[in-house]
Image (tube, rainbow, N blue to C red):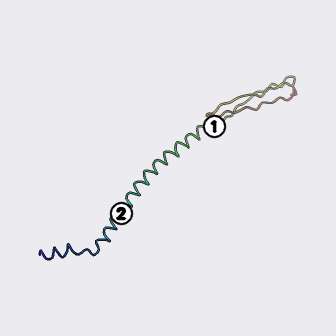
Amino acid sequence: MLRLLKKLRKNTKGAAGIEYGFLAALIAMAAIVSMQAVGVSLNTLFDGIASASDAASGDGGGNGGGNGNNGNGNGGGNGNGNNGNGNGNGGSNGGKP
């Protein structure tokens, strides 16, 4: 029995392949964990950019009322919507109905 144990301890055939397999599995697990962490941080980054973009763009629509009496018209209406500024259109028809 002792002779068999000594023989098994000296026999290293296949040990290198198993070690390389364990090493490859360890590298794969480390890569998966790091990619998941990077994916979460990128998702958070892009969500923040999308939120900032949505808040910056908005419907800045405004209506300006023009008074067409005697050809005087002021179409300078200002409207604010979601951090967007818009100038209204209001024109004069030169006092014509």
Side (left or right) of 4 relative to 53: left
Q: Position of residue 33 (x, y in %)?
A: 39, 54
- Near-viewer residue (6 or 71): 6
| First of labels 1, 2 by sequence position | 2
Q: Quickly name the residue at label 1.
A: 58
Side (left or right) of 81 relative to 20: right
Residue at 82 percent of width and 26 percent of height = 73
Residue at 34 percent of width and 64 percent of height = 23
Q: Position of residue 6 (x, y in %)?
A: 16, 74
Please, which residue is most extreme toward the left here? 1
Q: Which quadrant of the figure contains the C terminus?
A: top right
Residue at 51 percent of width and 45 percent of height = 45
Amino acid residing under circle 2: Ala
Please, which residue is most extreme toward the top here? 70
Q: Secondary structure at mark 1?
A: loop
Residue 92 versus residue 52 in the image, above or below: above
At label 1, counting other C-alpha atoms closer than 10 Å, the crowd grade (few under 14, some 14-19, many 20 or more) is some
Q: CA distance from mark 1 to mark 2?
A: 50 Å
Q: Quickly name the residue at label 2.
A: 25
Q: Position of residue 20 (x, y in %)?
A: 34, 68
Residue 56 versus residue 3 in the image, above or below: above
